[in-house]
Image: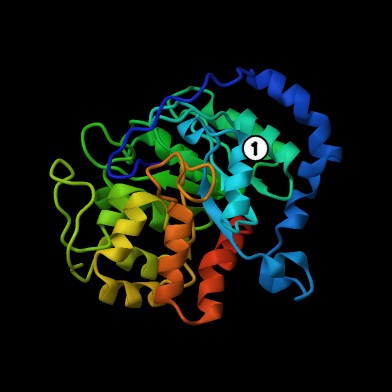
């Protein structure tokens, strides 16, 4: 989750407090008999299914949406998806609210219960809690599909971050990580520490997101204290360009102002970047607007704006489909090829 041009998100309404024990009690039956039991079947890779299957008809999967973003309700989140042509979305909780939005994993599970054909449930838990791994394992048993958005004020080389990445590797899960350097950032140290995890853990799919991830599209990265949204021509040889080429389990989330800024700052470079990583880039919006037209967000909808830009840049329909649908399915189903 990110602001547009550093605009601050308004505080959401108080979330319902559901204890972990109560969550497990409430959903134990649903896991074995309810809609979560069908989730793996509903989200098989497109290439593995006949062309008549509904998943082949998906137009758009948004890999980055929050409920409660600028106080948006679940119903308005679904309306946003309808207005932007989004069939399904990764709904990402933010348990601690450190980025301005608070969304509990239990609320995501409830959203999935209400809209099983639209919501792809991700979970999250504060890495600083002593029972974080047990909590995430319980969420895995409940049918969540990955972790994200990983976003606490903890450096990337913290042993607790590595423990969560190692658990994702064990569970064959994706994890969406918000990379934001600077003294008040999140998962700081992308240039120094990310590659070590990619070398060590091969099953986890790491999905890179946010300002410092996208600043590293260029080999010339200004200090975060100067700007988190660099502009101007991209210098070839950027960190994420190299790492996505070298490591099959690293993916890029195109969402938010940082993703759009990175893609539009140098269209000539972007054309080649999109082609090189057509199997590694996921469409995402991180959009807080309610109606797909930016009515409550300065007239801007991240989703429609990014869709229009990608359609202008990419003429090959198969290439567009990779970014709009197939790469999200690859991430969900453990295919890093």
Q: Is residue 233 visible?
A: yes
Quadrant in which the C terminus appears: bottom right
- Could you tell me which residue is drawn at 55 percent across and 54 percent down? 62
The residue closer to the viewer here, 325 or 313, is 313
User: Farthest right residue?
Assistant: 33
Q: Nearer the viewer, residue 276 or 157?
A: 276
Where residue 326 sits in the image (x, y, percent)?
59, 67
Residue 137 is situated, as x and y percent measured from the top left of the image, at 62, 35
Q: What residue lies at 43% left-to-right and 52% top-to-bottom?
A: 302
Q: Residue at x 24, y 69 (%)?
A: 266
The residue drawn where x is 74% and y is 49% is 39
Residue 172: percent from left, percent from top: 59, 52
For the N terminus, give its image quadrant. Answer: top left
Q: Residues within 10 Å of mark 1 (few under 14, many from 20)?
A: few
Residue 34 placement, left or right of 42: right
Q: Nearer the viewer, residue 47 or 272?
A: 272
Residue 58 in percent (x, y) is at: 67, 65
Total of numbered circles in the picture? 1
**Dividing the picture into quarters, in which one does residue 33 lie?**
top right
Circle 1 residue: 75
């Amino acid at each position: 989750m990110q602001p547009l041009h550093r605009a601050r998100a308004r505080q959401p309404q108080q979330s319902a407090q559901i204890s972990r024990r109560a969550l497990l009690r409430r959903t134990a039956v649903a896991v074995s008999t309810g809609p979560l039991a069908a989730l793996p079947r509903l989200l098989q890779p497109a290439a593995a299914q006949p062309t008549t299957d509904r998943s082949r008809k998906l137009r758009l999967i948004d890999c980055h949406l929050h409920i409660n973003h600028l106080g948006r309700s679940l119903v308005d989140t679904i309306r946003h998806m309808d207005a932007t042509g989004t069939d399904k979305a990764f709904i990402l909780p933010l348990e601690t609210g450190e980025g301005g939005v608070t969304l509990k994993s239990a609320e995501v599970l409830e959203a999935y219960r209400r809209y099983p054909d639209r919501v792809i449930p991700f979970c999250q838990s504060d890495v600083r809690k002593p029972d974080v791994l047990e909590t995430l394992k319980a969420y895995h048993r409940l049918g969540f599909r990955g972790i994200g958005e990983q976003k606490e004020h903890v450096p990337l080389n913290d042993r607790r971050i590595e423990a969560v990445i190692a658990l994702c590797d064990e569970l064959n899960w994706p994890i969406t990580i918000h990379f934001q350097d600077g003294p008040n950032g999140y998962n700081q140290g992308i240039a120094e520490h990310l590659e070590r995890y990619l070398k060590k853990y091969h099953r986890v799919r790491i999905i890179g997101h946010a300002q410092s991830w996208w600043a590293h599209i260029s080999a010339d990265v200004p200090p975060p204290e100067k700007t988190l949204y660099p502009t101007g021509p991209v210098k070839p040889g950027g960190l994420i360009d190299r790492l996505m080429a070298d490591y099959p389990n690293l993916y890029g989330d195109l969402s938010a102002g940082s993703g759009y800024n990175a893609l539009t700052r140098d269209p000539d470079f972007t054309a080649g970047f999109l082609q090189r990583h057509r199997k590694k880039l996921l469409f995402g919006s991180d959009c807080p607007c309610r109606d797909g037209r930016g009515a409550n967000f300065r007239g801007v909808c991240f989703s429609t704006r990014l869709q229009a830009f990608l359609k202008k840049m990419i003429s090959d329909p198969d290439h567009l489909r990779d970014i709009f649908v197939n790469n999200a399915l690859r991430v969900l189903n453990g295919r890093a090829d």
